[in-house]
Amino acid sequence: MSIMPPKAVAKTLPRRGGLFAGVADNLAALMIGLKYFVNPRRFSIYYPREYPELRQGYRGFIILNKAKCISCAACARICPSAAMKMIRVPVPHPKEPEKTVTKQFPVINYQRCIFCGYCVDICPTEALYHVNYHDIVYDNLAEMFWDLETFQKEPEYRTALEGTPIRLVIHEEYGLVKIPVRGAEENGG
Ligand code: SF4
Ligand code: SF4
């Protein structure tokens, strides 16, 4: 005797009051839009003319201080997205400068990096550090792969050069508001 699978039953979602409910929902949505159009208790960040100030400790781009690197490869091993890899480069022999030896250093692929910060945390010599920004523009994907030379330079932060930093603070009456960074400092923000 064959066992037949139970017949699939198509379920339909309950109707919510038909045409009038649909019109009411649309009117409600329009009213919400209208409320936020006239309500002064709203704000927009006019990025990139304005940009939120990111504090020290923010996990932005990672930079390598090559002089501190001891080639342990802990950063590349812990990276969960295979964004960091070790490469071998020739360096002068420590005792016989006329000779060269090869040494490993990390390089980073920002197409893959998820900014988790594990590599910075695990580095035993603090050779890796974050800058507190993450928004730079690339012309093509290849530029997102930083070679050893690029990895040692903090990238130019054009947003900061051309925009105004703002700080988001909680206002007792208005809730979340934005204020210029200088104003935040004067108010103890
Ligand atoms: S921040 Fe995370 S994802 Fe990016 S390179 Fe470091 S360990 Fe890998
Ligand atoms: S963990 Fe630090 S010291 Fe070790 S290879 Fe990476 S950058 Fe260099």
Image (spheres, helix red, strand yellow):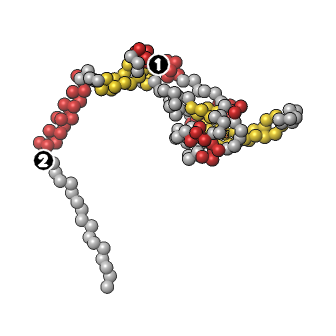
Residue marked by disc 2: 17
Query: How many dots with numbers?
Result: 2
Q: N-terminal of the two: label 1 or label 2?
A: 2
Q: Residues within 10 Å of mark 2 (few under 14, many from 20)?
A: few
Residue found at the far bottom of this picture? 1
Q: Amino acid at mark 1?
A: Gly
Residue 163's label in the rendered image is 1
Residue 20 point in image, percent of width and height: 11, 42
Above or below, 145 relative to 137: below
Q: Quadrant of residue 88?
A: top right
Q: Which quarter of the rendered image does ligand 2 occupy?
A: top right
Q: Image check: 58 left or right of 92?
A: left
Residue 78 point in image, percent of width and height: 60, 46
Identify the residue at image location x=19%, y=37%.
Answer: 26
Q: Is residue 33 visible?
A: yes
- Distance Cα–Cα, label 1 vs label 2: 50 Å
User: In terms of secondary structure, where does tag 2 sit?
Assistant: loop
Residue 145's label in the rendered image is none
Q: Quadrant of residue 189?
A: top left
Q: Quadrant of residue 48?
A: top left
Query: Observer-nearest residue: 185 or 153?
Result: 185
Query: Observer-nearest residue: 54 or 16?
Result: 54
Residue 86 point in image, percent of width and height: 68, 43
Query: Observer-nearest residue: 61 or 38?
Result: 61
Q: Amino acid at mark 2?
A: Gly
Q: Image check: 107 left or right of 52?
A: right
Identify the residue at image location x=43%, y=25%.
Answer: 52
